[in-house]
Amino acid sequence: MRLFTPVIFSSILFVVGCAGNSTVSLTADINKYQYVVLPNVLSYNGDPELMDLEVQIYDALELTRLTVIGEKEIYSLTEDQKQRLLLARFSARQNSDYSRISVNFTDYVTGRPVASCYGAYALGFDESGDLDGAMVKVSEEINKLF
């Protein structure tokens, strides 16, 4: 019985300590999208420790079926291509207990929310480890979705 309790506790801690999830709008056709852009990359003014997440999210998007383009490339797309374009925005929160990263996808033409992915992690040895774990989880969710 003594071994049983720590095993259960460890299992619960693992499930709570790392999580990922995706939500897709009921009206969204996720398969129609072919392009994605991270807008406003030149105007980031958030936490400097989290700034490199932009590059990691870009890399995660590169591993999907979507073609990642730069914001300045939008104007070279045809109207049909713009109909298949998503804007990806991200947010991150980190404290001494956990890290969480969310990436939201919005239809470029309509501005309607299409999907959201998040990853959370609380099992690292430090905040940097938690942030790395959250990035892995959100990347997995993005990859599953696209």
Image: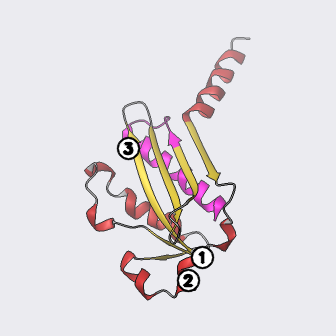
Residue 61 screen position, x and y as percent: 52, 67
Label 3 sits on a secondary structure element that is helix
Which marked residue is nearer to the observer: mark 3 or mark 1?
Answer: 1
How far, Cα to Cα, is label 2 from label 3? 38 Å
- Horizontal side of 20 relative to 104 (left or right) equals right
Q: Could you tell me which residue is drawn at 47 percent across and 63 percent down?
A: 88
Instruction: Characterize the local packing of mark 3: few (<14), some (14-19) or many (20 or more) Cα atoms within 10 angstroms.
Output: some
6 is higher (above) or lower (below) than 97: above
How far, Cα to Cα, is label 1 from label 2? 8 Å
> For this rendering, which residue is in front, 112 or 115?
112
Q: Which residue is mark 1?
A: 34
Q: Which residue is mark 3?
A: 128
> For this rendering, which residue is in front, 47 or 137?
47
* Region of the chain picked out in magenta, as a range: 120-146
Secondary structure mainly formed by the magenta segment: helix
Q: Tag 1 or tag 3, which sits nearer the N-term? A: 1
Q: Could you tell me which residue is drawn at 39 percent across and 56 percent down?
A: 53
Can you tell which mark lies on residue 57? Answer: none
Which marked residue is nearer to the observer: mark 2 or mark 3?
Answer: 2
Say if mark 2 contacts mark 3, CB within 8 Å: no
Q: Which residue is mark 2?
A: 81
Say if mark 1 contacts mark 2, CB within 8 Å: yes
Residue 96 screen position, x and y as percent: 37, 31
40 is higher (above) or lower (below) than 34: above
Q: Tag 3 or tag 2, which sits nearer the N-term? A: 2
> For this rendering, which residue is in front, 107 or 16?
107
Residue 59 shown in magenta? no
Image quarter of the C terminus: bottom right
Q: Tag 2 or tag 1, which sits nearer the N-term? A: 1
Residue 32 screen position, x and y as percent: 66, 73
